[in-house]
């Protein structure tokens, strides 16, 4: 299924409950267990300076877009085998659409 615009407010809630323990979105925000996501769209996997990525993530060669992130968030370990990201994924298309919609604005 292709990405479709979701509800930003619902995506913000999902980020807070499912992602914020490991990631920040604001410019200049710190990396936590996962990298800061500011500037995510259009960026290659494994490219935040100073963050210790897995080899799988560094070598995946994926450029993050609405569609690639939508697909990745369903099952990160399937999309990038051997990634160290512990997140199991969001199975519902609606949830992924909402989260990607939020991230598109929050990380710009």
Image (cartoon, grey):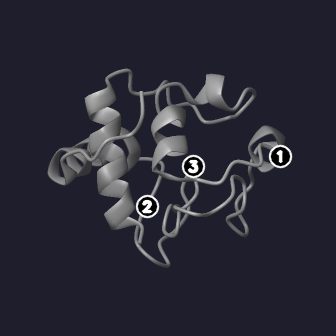
Query: Where's the C terminus, which quadrant?
Result: bottom left
* 26 in relation to 94, above or below: below
Q: Total number of numbered labels?
A: 3
**Image point (79%, 38%), residue name:** 56
Determine which residue is flagged by label 2: 24
Disc 2 versus disc 3: distance between alpha carbons? 10 Å
Per the image, label 3 sits on a secondary structure element best described as loop
**Residue at the extreme bottom:** 28
Query: Where's the N terminus, which quadrant?
Result: top left
Residue 76 position in % (x across, y down): 57, 30
Residue 1 is labelled as none
Direction from residue 7 to residue 108 in the image, left or right = right
Disc 2 versus disc 1: distance between alpha carbons? 23 Å
Residue 49 position in % (x across, y down): 72, 70
Determine which residue is flagged by label 1: 59
Q: Nearer the viewer, mark 3 or mark 1?
A: 1
Around disc 1, counting alpha carbons within 10 Å, would you say few (fewer than 14), some (14 to 19), or many (20 or more)? some
Earlier residue among tags 3 and 1: 3
Residue 65 position in % (x across, y down): 52, 53
Disc 3 versus disc 1: distance between alpha carbons? 19 Å
Determine which residue is flagged by label 3: 33
Around disc 3, counting alpha carbons within 10 Å, would you say few (fewer than 14), some (14 to 19), or many (20 or more)? few
């Amino acid at each position: 299924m292709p990405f479709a615009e979701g509800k930003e407010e619902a995506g913000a809630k999902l980020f807070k409950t499912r992602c914020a323990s490991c990631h920040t979105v604001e410019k200049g925000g710190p990396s936590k267990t996962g990298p800061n996501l500011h500037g995510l769209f259009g960026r290659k996997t494994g490219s935040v300076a100073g963050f210790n990525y897995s080899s799988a993530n560094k070598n995946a060669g994926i450029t993050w877009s609405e569609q690639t992130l939508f697909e990745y968030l369903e099952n990160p370990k399937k999309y990038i085998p051997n990634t160290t990201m512990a997140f199991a994924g969001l199975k519902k298309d609606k949830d992924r659409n909402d989260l990607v919609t939020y991230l598109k604005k929050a990380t710009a």
